Amino acid sequence: MNSPLKPRAAVERMAPYHPPTGGRAGKLRLDFNENTVGCSPKVIAYLKEKLTADALTVYPEYVDAMRELAAFFAVAPGELLLSNGTDEAIQVLINTFIEDGADVLLLKPSYAMYRFYAELAGASVREIGYLPEDLAFPLEEFLAVIRPETRAILIANPNNPTGTGIPVDGVRRILDAAPHAAVLIDEAYFEFYGVTALPLLRLYPNLFVSRTFSKVYGMAAMRCGCLFSNVANVRWMHKAQSPYSVNMLAAMAARAAVQDTEYVANYVKEVLAARELVYQGLEKLGIQFYRSQANFVLFRAGERAIPIRDALRERGVLIRDRSYEIPGCVRVTIGNRTQIERFLAELEALWTR
Ligand SMILES: Cc1ncc(COP(=O)(O)O)c(C=O)c1O
């Protein structure tokens, strides 16, 4: 009998990544940094209008979406790669520019998919820790470990799960220190932070910036993101990308989503107000937390991290354990004020028990 096949060595070696993927429906989802109230109603209306049997028969065409998204982000269409979420953007970047065994620099803790795709490609990954005191970006330490052979640097700004950011000046120092590396600045939470490396795009041919429709836009299920870089890089990545990886509905939804700027601005305002409530609520309970530039807050529950996560789940509120990477810490996504009041009330009941 034939035996099962052996995978590539890189697949055998890589650490598995198992995000919880089931049983979230109907609960207050403060565990994945999603938008907690839903996308703009204009997106749904647009999709309903355009979703016909005839439209579904056609392979996706991206020309209109590319033109409109490029205009929205103030780049040329040739500087933009549409992707199946940021995850595919990371994968395409790595598949295009990173050879087996290449040196890739990451931060720790950070978004798990950087390591995932780098390891999958057979890269040699090094990780530099966020500063233990306040989880700030370790700029000097990071600059010190960049090598001439470093081929990729992948940074979330602001970072998940720490919520801390690096100012544009810091990004520039990294770009100056690593002219031979692809430097990705993943701006998945940009709208909550307001700091972007996009204006540096034409100054640094090794810069890549990503944005997503999964967070503030409330369209995580659609899987749609944008990756920006100079025209030559985008052309290479386009060559290495599957031609129809973004489905037609996602491309349409993205077009509609960027038109409703008022919706996004209102949601950001609401989240920032709710984040203040979280700070106040945690302070009242004497729980240490890290100030965040994003729609989530990391706090220290100590020995109670996992029991608190589990007890909240039983009460219908989901938060994410991060104690496996920052001892004692859990992360709560910030929703609207009503949702956060519910979270705080449940937390207080458990904490003071
Ligand atoms: C830093 C960061 N980048 C990207 C993503 C995922 O983005 P997408 O849904 O566009 O793949 C996340 C999701 O948690 C994230 O935290």
Image (tube, rainbow, N blue to C red):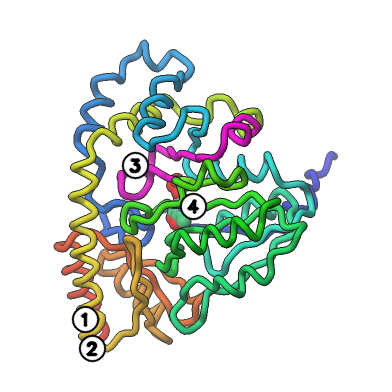
Magenta segment includes 329: no
Q: Earlier in the sequence, mark 3 or mark 2?
A: 3
State the residue position of label 3. 219
At x 37% / y 76%, what residue is drawn? 290
Q: Earlier in the sequence, mark 3 or mark 4?
A: 4
Q: CA distance from mark 4 to mark 2?
A: 38 Å
Question: How far across and how far down the image is residue 202, in percent?
Answer: 53, 41
Foreground disc of the pair 4, 1: 4
Query: Element type at marker 3?
Result: loop
Which quarter of the figure has residue 47?
A: top left
Foreground disc of the pair 3, 4: 4
Foreground disc of the pair 1, 3: 3
State the residue position of label 1. 348
Disc 4 C-beta below 8 A from ligand 1: yes
* Contact (Cβ within 8 Å) of mark 3 with mark 2: no
Q: CA distance from mark 4 to mark 1?
A: 34 Å
Foreground disc of the pair 4, 2: 4
Crowdedness near tag 2: few (<14), some (14–19) or many (≥20) residues, C-alpha within 10 Å: few
Farthest residue toward the front?
A: 203
Q: Earlier in the sequence, mark 4 or mark 1?
A: 4
Farthest residue toward the right?
A: 1
Type of amino acid under label 3: Met
Q: Residue 250: in sight, yes or no?
A: no
State the residue position of label 4. 186
Crowdedness near tag 1: few (<14), some (14–19) or many (≥20) residues, C-alpha within 10 Å: some
Q: CA distance from mark 3 to mark 2?
A: 36 Å
* Contact (Cβ within 8 Å) of mark 4 with mark 1: no
Q: Which residues are magenta?
A: 211-236
* Contact (Cβ within 8 Å) of mark 2 with mark 1: yes
Foreground disc of the pair 3, 2: 3
Type of amino acid under label 1: Glu
